[in-house]
Amino acid sequence: MAKTEDMHFEAGEMINVDVCLKNHMREELQDVRLSLAFYQDYLNGRCNYRLDSRVAVIGNDAIQIPQVRPWELLCMRLRSFLSVVNGAFPKD
């Protein structure tokens, strides 16, 4: 299961997201795609996944990795996410 981590930021704040991926399998992975999906948690059992007008992405929100060798650890930074509305937005 993917780890979820809360991010809190102010309107207009630029943020960076660091992602690390480790292949624990004996086989190499081919064509791996990492992407970020944002949603707003209202903390009452409801979540808003329709943030098209609330979060603007400047740069890439996904990366394609051609291959990940067995036991290889890759760390990368997805840059330049811009929040246009105040709030707490968990990332998956």
Image: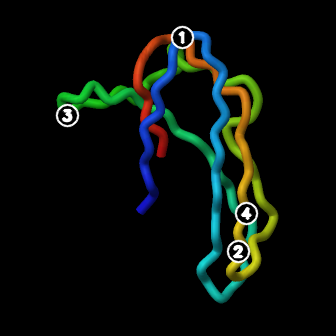
Residue carrying label 3:
45
Residue carrying label 1:
11
* Residue 50 point in image, percent of width and height: 43, 24
* Residue 38 point in image, percent of width and height: 49, 33
Label 3 – label 4 distance at C-alpha: 34 Å
Q: Residue at x 42, y 48 (%)?
A: 4
Residue carrying label 2:
29
Q: Amino acid at mark 3?
A: Gly
Q: Amino acid at mark 4?
A: Leu
Q: Residue 74 got which mark? A: 4
**In the image, residue 84 above or below residue 88:** above
What color scheme is it? rainbow
Q: Residue at x 75, y 71 (%)?
A: 68
Q: Tell which tag, 1 or 3, sits nearer the viewer.
A: 1
- Mark toward the start of the polypeptide (3 vs 4): 3
Q: Amino acid at mark 2?
A: Leu
Label 1 – label 4 distance at C-alpha: 30 Å
Q: Residue at x 59, y 79 (%)?
A: 24
Q: Residue at x 63, y 39 (%)?
A: 17
Label 2 – label 3 distance at C-alpha: 36 Å
